[in-house]
Image (spheres, rainbow, N blue to C red):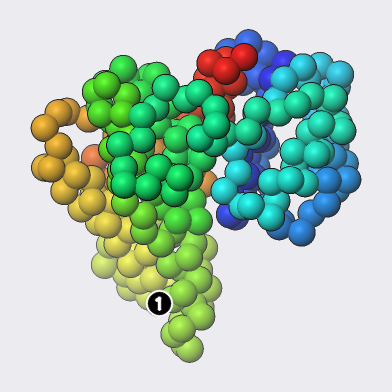
Amino acid sequence: MLLVIDVGNTNTVIGMFDGEKLVADWRIETRRGRTSDEHSMLLRQLIAVRNLSPELVDGGVLACVVPPAQAAMELAMRNTFRIDPLVVGLSIRTDVPLLVDTPREVGADRIVNAKAAYAQTNGGCIVVDFGTATTFDVISPKGEYLGGAISPGLVISANALYMEAAKLPRVPLEVPPHCVGTGTIESMQSGLVYGYCGLVDGLVQRMKEELDFPVKVFATGGQALIIADQCKYIDVVAPTLTLDGLRLLYDLNR
C-alpha cells in the first residue's frame, strides 16, 4: 500500500492507497513542534483504528508547506514503515511545467493539485483550494501551471472578525438560511459564507475572462464542502484531490 501525506499550515491530510483505490484517509491538526516519535506514534494509532498494519505500507510520498515539520515527518515515515518517502519539490519529476516568474515559490500542494486536476480533465482547469489560505491555480490545456491567486482563508477571515471587533462573537462556519441576517450571528455567517462566495466567484470569473481556453473549476480543501455548493462557478468538488495528486506523482517517479 501507498502512504500519502500532505502537511498544510492548519491541517495534515493522510491517505492510504491500495493501487488506485483510496482505502483510508484522515485529517489531523498540523503542529510544527511535533517530534518524529510523536508523528510515528500518531501514524500507528490512525492506521490501527482502521484495522490496518504498518507492514502493509511499501511506499510513501510527502508534500509539505511547513518547513519546520518536514524533517520530523520524513523521519517518522522512515522509522515507522521502513520506506524512503518521495518528497514533492523541484527535484522530482512532475510533468507540470511551471510557467511563472519564480518556480521555487510555488507550494508543493499547488503542484500536486495541478497534477490531479489535469489528470481528470486532460484540459484547462482552475483549482480552488480552501485551506489556511485559499489558493486559485490555473492549468493550461497542455498541463502547464500558469499561476493564480492567493487570498486569506475562510477561517482566517472569521478569526480576524472576532479578534478585531470587540462586540462580535466567534460563530460556527455554517451556511445561514438567508443572506439578509436577522441577528448578529446570522449576519456574520452571511457576510463570511456568502461574502466569501462572492470573492471566489469574482476571482474565477476574472480569470476566465483573461484566459483564451475553457476551464473546469475544481474545489478542494478543508472548507470546500461549506463554500463550494454556494458558488456559481465551481464545477467539481473533490475533497481528496491532493491525495490523488500525490499518488499520481509517486507512480510517475517510481
Residue 31 lies, with reference to residue 220, above or below; the image says: below
* Residue 6 in the image, given as x and y percentages of width and height: 61, 39
Q: Residue, x 48% and y 65% (percent of image)?
A: 156
Residue 83 lies, with reference to residue 11, above or below; the image says: above
Q: Which residue is mark 1?
A: 184
Q: Secondary structure at mark 1?
A: helix
Q: Residue, x 50% and y 56% (percent of image)?
A: 132
Q: Nearer the viewer, residue 72 or 169?
A: 72
Which corner quadrant holds the N terminus?
Answer: top right
Q: Nearer the viewer, residue 60 or 189?
A: 60
Which corner quadrant holds the C terminus?
Answer: top right
* Residue 252 in the image, given as x and y percentages of width and height: 53, 16
* Residue 70 in the image, given as x and y percentages of width and height: 69, 46
Q: Residue furthest bottom?
A: 166
* Residue 65 in the image, given as x and y percentages of width and height: 57, 48
Q: Residue furthest top?
A: 19
Specify whether 107 is left or right of 219. Answer: right
